[in-house]
Amino acid sequence: MCGDAFLVRFENVGLRYGSGDEVLTDLSFAIARNSFQFLTGPSGAGKTTLMRLILMSLKPTRGLITLFDRDTTTIAKDEITAIRRRIGVVFQDFRLLDHLTTYENVALPLFVQGREERSYRAEVTELLKWVGLGQKIGAYPPILSGGEKQRAAIARALIVRPELLLADEPTGNVDPSLARRLLRLFVELHKSGTSIVIATHDLGLMDQFDSARRLVLGEGRLHVYD
Amino acid sequence: MIMWIKGLPRIFSVGERLTLIPADSTAGRALVTVIAIMTFLATLTGGSAILVREASRDWSATAAREMTIQIKPVSGRNAEGDGKKIAQALQDIPGIEDARLFSREESARLLEPWLGSGVDLGELPVPTLVVVKLQSASPSTLTTLKDRVRQISPAAVVDDHRGWVQRLERMTGALVIVALMVLGLVLTAMGLAIAFATRGAMAGSREIVSVLHFVGASDHFIAREFQRHFLRLGLRGAAFGGLASIIIFLLSGWLTSRWSADPAGEQIEALFGQFNLGGSGFLTIGFIAAMMAMLTGHISRKVVYRQLRRVG
Ligand SMILES: Nc1ncnc2c1ncn2[C@@H]1O[C@H](COP(=O)(O)OP(=O)(O)OP(=O)(O)O)[C@@H](O)[C@H]1O
Ligand SMILES: [Mg+2]
């Protein structure tokens, strides 16, 4: 379906919340297939906002966003659903469902696609073990530690083998050694063909993979360092 | 560790499905109660309508197979003699089972509640009655009967109860319409209650709905999840309401069968028939209750779907 080399393309995109000032101004950039980039910038710079634009949970106040070759201004609801199935997201605040177990939370993207539990059970348990949650399979999010929730959120984003992974501060709640492991996980995923966007202001993390592209947000504008 | 063990059955139990919309206990219970009450009212109305219709069918069947011939006392004629002659003549007509002269004493007993006992009817202009039982109310039998009666006495009036049967039918028809209207009102009220409850549940599950969207759930899927949730509540409420009204009908059937031992009970029974709903009646109650449950699921799905479309 996607012949273009770019999964996401922004052209002169501006966004304001309500009648406030523009949080993002004149953003023009693209995210290539099978690319790896850090999205950085000070707190409040608009990293989360940018990700929400890509997720179509916000509409740009001006400009054009193209996702998987589809102009998002004319997109139909069914297509939005189809596109979201190709994107994995790790939210800054995790957004796990508190009444589901860790296992069920991670399996959720497959479950909502109507897949049989038998077909993904082994895969989900495997991934949970990989992120170090093998012992927490039946635990509910409210009793998980911040780092455990974060890993569950990451596992939920990875389980569908997305073409594009958006991770908002995915290492904000874990110790440096686990952060390194998670980064390695993202790099592995990148090698297997997924485009990765990691929003972070952890300079140490970025230094561990300094060949990655950097998108730096500041005062509403985006500077790209390839 | 303990959590993990506790989690085990939920992970590996086969066939048990995830419930994505958590059963919000207080709002859920309130809705179950509303549905139970509505189902109770709906099934009670439906059951009563069936009872009335069946009783009236019994009456009119009996009434249609009976006729009375009144011979008015006219000077110069012997009404009682004419009655005897008529009763005699009618016996021979095919299709007539029996024709019998109502004796003076029987008439007196019939009038006793109004006139008191010991009244000499000879002093009163009371018509003589011939009661006819028909095998079947075929038109040819009726015309032959009327001709025969007119030949014998011009003062005789044939009452084939048709007017009465018609009035009875019109009345039960009206009752059934009223019952349908009550049913309609109950359904409307329930539909509104469900729509409100669904919106409330959606507002309470906004975070869940948004997460479901992000992990790739379609509106269709989300609407079905809500439908499943509300169908479960609907089934519970409808079961309570339906059972309650089945108990009411069984109880009243049992009570009337006990009453019919005494004379007042006999009158009630003559009026309403046995308070026995019968198999088809109970089936109807089950059907109405099932409808209420399905309606609950259906309405909530519609509401969710429309809300999701609107939010965009
Ligand atoms: N829903 C909203 N309504 C109004 N203003 C908002 C909303 N969300 C974010 N903002 C504002 O937009 C700006 C950018 O916020 P955003 O959350 O995108 O920053 P961020 O770069 O993700 O910050 P952080 O690193 O702290 O997560 C902030 O000034 C914030 O106050
Ligand atoms: Mg943020």
Image (cartoon, rainbow, N blue to C red):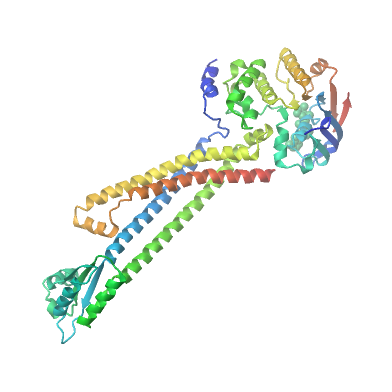
Judged from this view, the residue extending furthest toward the bottom is B76
Can residue A141 be seen at all in this image of the molecule? no
User: Taking B247 as reference, is B212 left or right?
Assistant: right
Name the residue: 43% across, 51% down. Answer: B42
Can residue B303 be seen at all in this image of the molecule? yes
Q: Quadrant of the N terminus of chain B?
A: top right
Could you say where residue A134 lies in the image, as x and y percent from the top left?
61, 16
Could you say where residue B75 lies in the image, as x and y percent from the top left?
17, 86
User: Taking B58 as reference, is B179 left or right?
Assistant: right
> Can you tell me which quadrant of the image ligand 2 is in?
top right
Quadrant of residue A43 within the rendered picture: top right
User: Taking B132 as reference, is A101 left or right?
Assistant: right
Q: Does residue B30 lie above or below A95 as drawn? A: below
Instruction: From the viewer's side, name the closer residue of A216 and B170.
Output: B170
Q: Does residue B67 lie above or below A75 as drawn? A: below
Could you say where residue B83 lies in the image, as x and y percent from the top left?
17, 77
Judged from this view, the residue extending furthest toward the top is A177
Name the residue: 51% across, 46% down. Answer: B295
Could you say where residue B274 lies in the image, as x and y percent from the top left?
28, 53
Tag count in the figure?
0
Name the residue: 23% across, 55% down. Answer: B265
Q: Does residue A208 lie above or below B216 as drawn? A: above
Name the residue: 55% across, 18% down. Answer: B4
Q: Quadrant of the C terminus of chain B?
A: top right
